[in-house]
Image (tube, rainbow, N blue to C red):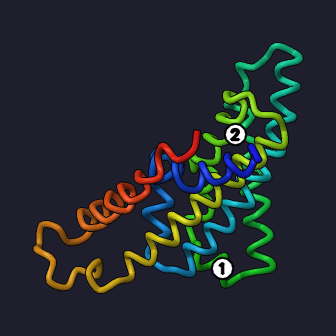
Amino acid sequence: MVAVSIILSMILANNYVLAQFLGICPFLGVSKKMDSAVGMGGAVVFVMVLATAVTWPIQQVLNKFHIEYLQTVIFILVIAALVQLIEMMLKKYMPALYSSLGVFLPLITTNCAVLGVCIANIDAGYGFGLSIANAFGASVGFTLALILFAGIRSTKLVNEDGVPQPFKGVPLTLISAAILSLSFMGFSGMFS
């Protein structure tokens, strides 16, 4: 039951993009087309859960040898290696998705949401199972936000028809993201 609460909390109330503002770069960059948003979301789910599964035991080893100060460096290296592996697999088995993601696939390496969830699991004192649940919820929440925002950006309003000149382009995108974020703030307080 705790795992379900953590997953729902991370999807709705504590969404990494919309409530904690982590992972904004791929959120804004990949959300122009629905195909890219779904592909990036799937890749983030895979990377975030796998990164958590790999970094949690590594943290236990760091704790055992009292070298916790290496956490960030080692976690970044692990995440970069995982993203490189996914990039090679997508290039070989799903070339259309690989080309549609373009430069944004390597951005998963620098996506602070992936590193943030790995470190947040350690800081919260979660065991392995709850860490995986937290990572899964956070990645599904990231994917949900990405897909919703891609849907918003594909509407006629956000395509800038009838929008005053000062609001065209990036300002309209940021205002739309802020409104989406506000809508998710309604879920805060639902989970403890």
* Residue at x 79% of width, y 17% of height: 67
* Residue at x 81% of width, y 29% of height: 59
Residue count near mark 1 (Cα–Cα under 10 Å), binned few <14, some 14–19, many ≥20: some
For the image shown, how many numbered marks are present on the structure? 2
Task: Give the vertical position of 125 relative to 85 (above or below).
Answer: above
Residue sitting at the far top:
66
Observer-nearest of 103 and 15: 15
User: Image quadrant of residue 183?
Assistant: bottom left
Q: Nearer the viewer, mark 2 or mark 1?
A: 2
Q: Secondary structure at mark 1?
A: helix
What residue sits right under mark 1 in the picture?
97
On the picture, is 135 further left or further right than 50? left
Observer-nearest of 79 and 88: 79
User: Image quadrant of residue 175?
Assistant: bottom left
On the picture, is 156 further left or further right than 161? right
- Tell me the distance, in whole angstroms, between the alpha carbons under discs 2 and 1: 26 Å
Q: Sequence-wise, which precedes: disc 2 or disc 1?
A: 1
Task: Give the vertical position of 103 relative to 8 (above or below).
Answer: below
* Residue at x 70% of width, y 39% of height: 118
Q: Is residue 50 visible?
A: yes
* Residue at x 64% of width, y 48% of height: 114
What residue sits right under mark 2 in the picture?
118
On the picture, is 172 further left or further right than 145? left
Residue 14 in the image, given as x and y percentages of width and height: 53, 46
Q: Secondary structure at mark 2?
A: helix
Q: Amino acid at mark 2?
A: Cys
Q: Amino acid at mark 1?
A: Leu
